[in-house]
Amino acid sequence: MSKDRFQYHDYFLMDELLTEEHLLVRASIREWVKKEVSPIVEDACQKAEFPKQWIKGLAEIGAFGPYIPVEYGGGGMDQISYGIIMMELERGDSGLRSTASVQSSLVMYPIFTYGSEEQKRKYLPQLASGKMMGCFGLTEPDHGSNPSGMLSTIKDKGDHVILNGSKMWISNAPFADIAVVWAKDEEGVIRGMIVERGMEGFSTPETHGKWSLRASATGELVFDNVRIPKENILPNVKGLKGPLGCLNSARYGISWGAIGAALDCYDSALRYSKERVQFDRPIGGFQLTQKKLAEMITEITKAQLLTWRLGVLKNENRATPSQISMAKRNNVNMALQIAREARQIHGGMGITGEYPIMRHMMNLESVITYEGTHDIHLLITGMDVTGLNAFQ
């Protein structure tokens, strides 16, 4: 069991832009990660197990719905606090951040934003406390980057609808109590609904054999003539803008989270470069190693500034989907490149569980694909700057 020796890196004195509350939030999350996550995460990944005790801990530190109003059980925090929480969690592990991100942005957010008052009162406090866990059903076996082509359907049966279809690559699915699911009605309009575990015909088979996000539970959602009461349908949204609104919130969190993974890799590489001696001197004294480290901290600093500004815009309700896409794409790619360079600095030791590098690298290979692939986000930016749609 390796000791968590992580130290934060703030090359441009970004802390001066944060409030006292932001700093307190960061300190509390980091302390929990060092105490509860770091000592067991490598073993959990080796065993491909999600440590269920993390759920209680995440709830206690306020990682579920931190920006949801207090009256619904949330933390009532701002968007920068949410981003900081995601960064500190992903510094521990991307799978851990995924669990909290799904609960907050893909389950609690749509219920709060699109749900009825009754739905908010029924589900949000339970979700915030971790007594209830949720997942998000959008991606299908044949429809990932093109969710509008989904095949899942609902048919009106009076006081209820009948849901048929399937979803895959669903974080939290194996243990989720509810699923926020998107399906087309008989007019082809996408609707959101809350599917509860125990409803007849609803199953969540687990996905095995992953080489990435191994400390995160992933599964499928299968709907075989599932009877959904109409009071479980989200009343305040229709169309693709519903799930895309959720994804904007989640992608924003990922843009912060990826910085955490990058910082962990950089911190480990910097320390290793000062301790590892070759040719009678620390390898950090060689030009090529310094080049790698200098480029790492430069890219991290650029990402920190990008997400801080995005957080300010989010707090002001001015952040656009295209701006969020740019941050998600840039920061995840940045983190993945830093993980690869950090692996080089660690040499052969970089592939072992004694250091976090290979685990972060494998995790980021998923993060760069989910909730909008690297290339799809590139095209979103391209469409925004040219006004021309390359998707059609």
Image: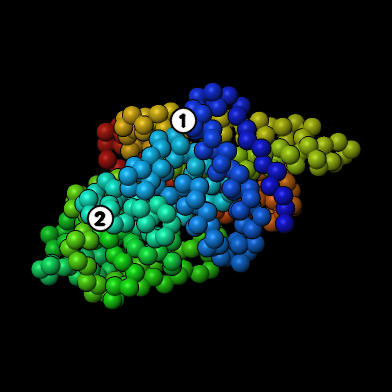
Is residue 260 something one can see in this rendering? Answer: no
**Image side of residue 136 versus residue 334, left or right:** left
Dot 1, how many residues are within 10 Å of its Cα: few (below 14), some (14-19), or many (20+)?
A: some
Residue 301 falls in which quadrant of the image?
Answer: top right
Numbered badge on residue 308: 1
In the depicted structure, whether residue 141 falls above or below residue 57: below
Return the disc, 2 or 1, that comes first in the chain's sequence.
2
Q: Nearer the viewer, residue 253 or 231?
A: 231
Q: State the residue at coordinates (38%, 46%).
A: 74
The residue furthest left is 158
Q: Residue at x 23, y 74 (%)?
A: 225
The reply to whether the C-beta atoms of the residues labelled 2 and 1 are less than 8 Å apart is no
Q: Residues within 10 Å of mark 2 (few under 14, many from 20)?
A: some
Helix or strand or loop: what does disc 1 sit on?
A: helix
The image position of residue 164, as x and y in percent, is 24, 70
User: Which amino acid, mark 2?
Assistant: Gln
Give the amino acid type for the residue marked by disc 1 in the picture: Trp
For this orientation, the residue located farthest to the right is 280
Instruction: Mark 2 vs mark 1: give the one in front.
Output: 2
Name the colour scheme: rainbow
Residue 92 percent coordinates (x, y) = 58, 49
Q: Which residue is mark 2?
A: 119
**In the rendering, which numbered label is found on residue 150?**
none
Q: Is 258 left or right of 281, judged from the image as shown?
A: left
